[in-house]
Image: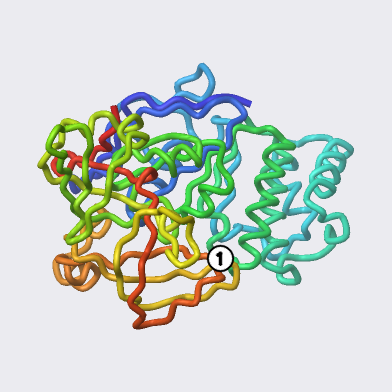
């Protein structure tokens, strides 16, 4: 095992495109770190630079105490698992897993021991004589993982390994890969565009956009304390509801009101104690963010909850919850990833910017229907606030 350090790493292509900009990041020894971001954000380029498949154009990458900038891939002591598995179709499962060991001219007895040990961990014992064509997608993925395990490398690199699997199998494989990494204990760098994968698998998540690292934190902290608008909008499904609002103090300045369109919500002392810098934004526009979980049908919410009026535009009944959608007459804040689109696509994707379609998670006991005028309870204490000019979270 070994740790990985990026020190001011950059990647600029000959055409001038800068895929990764001044990346500073440390993957700790034995850690499972997932890098997540939208397509084209630089995450796969980052992985390929660790592997030596992309030459860096600035900074240093170290694996352990060794700077690997000029080392060829074969000398970096890494193992990669690819999106397409990259199995040899004419070889059995045993031979696919053993291939790298045979190239090293390892004794046959040790090869068999390592392959059988990996097969036991991955539950492939009964499949060692089969060829890839007779395996399911999940079994092929296990073979690819087995090929990485037997090498006993310092570092695992996984490049969107679940993207070719169906939804049910992806859920199963997420759990299996996470359990395997804990058992083997190898430092792991995993890249994906799927934030659910990132949140469910990682010890820490690194969010990247436009080649710039946005935030690195354990999944729950990333969800509870996003550092900027991009992270707030990107992490969570459905994503955080972001809209413009103003903060107004009362006559003696002891209490703030949050004005979201025509709705006026009291900013509690509890919230002010968590976000004391809000006092610097009296009578100023802020961006307020509310997670879908922070709304509830007022008819079944706790008595005394603060509420807003809304007309239900759509509902999605999922059995364990109901996702309700309703409009709020407050200017919508467009997340940064939407701005990466061209002008026509961006306009189509964001719709009416003068109102915000809010997604809310309701208890399945709700009886709301499309078209109903309802009261929606809002947990203001969980609100997030961002400076509209910088996009940074307003906290201390």
Instruction: Please tell me which residue lies in front, 8 or 71.
Output: 8
* Residue found at x 43% / y 39%: 206
Quarter of the image for residue 214 reads top left
User: Dividing the image into 4 quarters, which one contains the N terminus?
Assistant: top right
The percent coordinates of residue 156 (x first, y second) are: 59, 39
Q: How many marks on residues?
A: 1
Instruction: Please tell me which residue lies in front, 40 or 361.
Output: 361
Quarter of the image for residue 64 reads top right
* Residue found at x 56% / y 55%: 161
The percent coordinates of residue 263 (x first, y second) are: 22, 59
Instruction: Please tell me which residue lies in front, 107 or 217.
Output: 217
**Colouring style:** rainbow
Could you tell whether 2 is left or right of 224 in the image? right
**Residue at the extreme top of the image, as rendered:** 65
Task: Say which residue label 1 marks.
Answer: 164
The percent coordinates of residue 376 (x first, y second) are: 37, 64
Please, what secondary structure does the residue beneath circle 1 have? loop
* Residue found at x 32% / y 39%: 268
Residue 339 seen in the figure: no
The percent coordinates of residue 196 (x first, y second) are: 51, 54
Mark 1 Cα shell of 10 Å, populated few (<14), some (14-19), many (≥20): some
Residue 346 seen in the figure: yes
User: Dividing the image into 4 quarters, which one contains the C terminus?
Assistant: top left
Is residue 351 placed above or below 182 in the rendered structure? below
* Residue found at x 41% / y 38%: 49
Instruction: Please tell me which residue lies in front, 118 or 275.
Output: 275
């Amino acid at each position: 095992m070994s740790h990985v350090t990026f020190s001011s790493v950059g990647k600029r292509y000959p055409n001038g495109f800068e895929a990764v900009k001044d990346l500073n990041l440390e993957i700790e020894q034995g850690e499972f770190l997932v890098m997540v971001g939208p397509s084209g954000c630089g995450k796969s380029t980052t992985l390929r630079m660790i592997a030596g498949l992309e030459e860096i154009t600035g900074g240093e990458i170290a694996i352990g105490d060794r700077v690997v900038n000029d080392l060829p891939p074969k000398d970096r002591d890494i193992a990669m698992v690819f999106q397409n598995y990259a199995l040899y179709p004419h070889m059995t499962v045993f031979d696919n897993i053993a291939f790298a060991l045979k190239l090293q001219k390892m004794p046959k007895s040790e090869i068999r021991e390592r392959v059988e040990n990996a097969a036991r961990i991955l539950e492939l014992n009964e499949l060692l004589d089969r060829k890839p064509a007779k395996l399911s997608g999940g079994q092929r993925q296990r073979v690819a993982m087995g090929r990485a395990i037997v090498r006993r490398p310092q570092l695992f690199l996984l490049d969107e390994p679940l993207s070719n699997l169906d939804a049910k199998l992806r859920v199963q494989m997420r759990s299996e890969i996470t359990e395997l990494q804990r058992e083997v204990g190898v430092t792991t760098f995993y890249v994906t565009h799927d934030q659910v994968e990132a949140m469910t698998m990682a010890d820490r998540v690194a969010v990247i956009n436009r080649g710039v690292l946005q935030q690195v934190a354990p999944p729950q902290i990333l969800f509870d304390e996003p550092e900027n608008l991009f992270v707030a909008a990107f992490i969570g499904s459905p994503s955080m509801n972001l809209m413009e609002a103003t903060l107004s103090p009362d006559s003696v300045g002891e209490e703030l009101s949050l004005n979201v369109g025509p709705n006026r919500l009291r900013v509690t002392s509890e919230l002010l104690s968590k976000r004391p810098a809000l006092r610097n934004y009296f009578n100023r526009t802020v961006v307020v963010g509310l997670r879908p979980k922070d709304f509830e049908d007022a008819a079944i919410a706790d008595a005394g909850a603060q509420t807003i009026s809304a007309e239900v535009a759509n509902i999605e009944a999922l059995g364990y919850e109901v996702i309700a959608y309703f409009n709020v007459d407050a200017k919508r804040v467009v997340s940064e990833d939407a701005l990466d689109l061209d002008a026509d696509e961006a306009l189509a994707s964001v719709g009416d910017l003068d109102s915000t379609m809010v997604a809310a998670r309701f208890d399945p006991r709700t009886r709301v229907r499309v078209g109903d005028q309802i009261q929606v309870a809002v947990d203001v204490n969980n609100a997030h606030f961002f400076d509209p000019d910088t996009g940074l979270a307003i906290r201390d």
